[in-house]
Image (cartoon, rainbow, N blue to C red):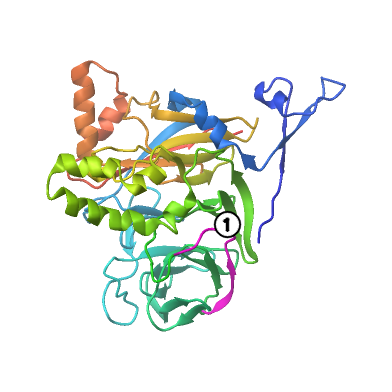
Amino acid sequence: MTISFRISLFCSNFADPGCTSQSKKQSDESEETAFVLDSTIRIGDAIEKALPSMKLSKVVDSIVYVPLETKIYLTNGLLQYVKPYWCAFPGRLFDAKGKYVKQIGKLGGGPGEDTSPWGYMVTYDEKRGLFYTQGNKIIQYDKNGKFTGAEKTIQYTSGGMISGGSLTGLAGMATADSLYMLVNYPDSAYWMNTNLDIVYSERIPLDSSLHQPANVYAQGIQYEFSDYDGHTLFYNFFTDCMYTVTDNGLKVRWKFDMKDLGPDKRAFLNDYMTHITGIVKISRQAKGDEKTKKLLAENSEYAKLVDNKKRILNAYESERYVVMQWMNIIAYEGIRKKHSPYLLAFLDKTNGNTFAISQHLTDDIDGGKPFELRLGVHNGAMVSWIWPYELKDYIAQQKEKGEWVSERLVALADGLKEDDNPVLIMAYLKKK
């Protein structure tokens, strides 16, 4: 189901000049001019004219730091937002102030336990006070984290999802209006009720040239959900669209025009095994020689398909902006010892301007490290995180160089132990 739309916004004659370029002038210039914002975001144009860097204060009003309570020690930065909680993998919940709340789910072979060796993700239905974990099962818990007795192992087949077997290709679970949506990689969406029954399904409309090779379940592109204005949003790389998740299907909210900068998407579906088998082939041919390995990676078949192409990793929405995370693709980064940083682009919904940054956002608010969007956009804030020891080391280096760091950031670091849990960085975006 694809439904395009347009958003009507308004700006006065004293607004940003960018408004006037897309506005229909009226005879009386003293009156407000109607501005119509197209649902297509021309990010390709913005990337071609990307700014090297930009001050964080251009798009952000304030920064709030939330240290996660070190009641239990976290060993990695695998965090997700499970509204209204922060969830540390797998299933450890912290509230908005960083206080540890409870554990949801458990690995094991018994009832209410997940058998996945890779762990599980968590979804929360705030309206009903129900938690769900998704690993090798869908398991339901009450608001206190107690197993309700409802669980189901789900298997994907060409005819749909059925009970029994093992979970194959589940890329995520999200709340719709009164139902839940399961996305099976790469193109199948299913709606489930609280009894864990599949109500109906639909296909995500991929290009007819795209397909998942038979008997291949590798997930080359990560799927992620976000929340805006009470609705779940879902960005899909293969369709270049952001959808609103409803009980009646996926509805197109934003479209992204990459021009000719993006990769051929078949490299991430039809030809994804070229990437997997390429690693093995390169290692065998190099016979342990690092220079040969790097040279083979640079000239590999997969590198020819994707190198230097631009890819949108994800997209989020706030009151004023659509925030897009993008990157320059480098095949086999680990082998080539190259890193492709995650970059940002913004659509300003007040005037229709889209702009991109090709290097970093400079923290001119507190003098912290260049801002990296690591945990998406939630409740109007771009969210990142940092380990306390990293923050302490950074401040020490800045002081040694005579660079400015705000007193409150120094005080925050001084109040932390090096082995404490991560600190969330909430950079609140400007509003209209």
Percent across and percent down for residue 333 are 28, 43
48 up-or-down from 157: above or below: above
Residue pictured at 24% horizontal, 55% vertical? 281
Residue pictured at 54% horizontal, 58% vertical? 209
> In the picture, residue 397 is in which quadrant?
top left
Secondary structure at numbered mark 1: loop
Left-right relation of 208 to 100: right
64 up-or-down from 80: above or below: above
Residue 230 visible at all: no
Q: Check the picture and name the quadrant holding the N terminus.
A: bottom right
Percent across and percent down for residue 46 are 54, 30
User: What residue sits right under mark 1 in the picture?
Assistant: 207
Q: Which residues are magenta?
A: 196-212
- Amino acid type indicated by mark 1: Asp
- Choose between 337 and 407: the one closer to the eye: 337
> In the picture, residue 369 is in which quadrant?
top left
Alpha-carbon neighbours of circle 1 within 10 Å: few (<14), some, or many (≥20)? Answer: few
152 up-or-down from 19: above or below: below
Left-right relation of 347 to 79: right
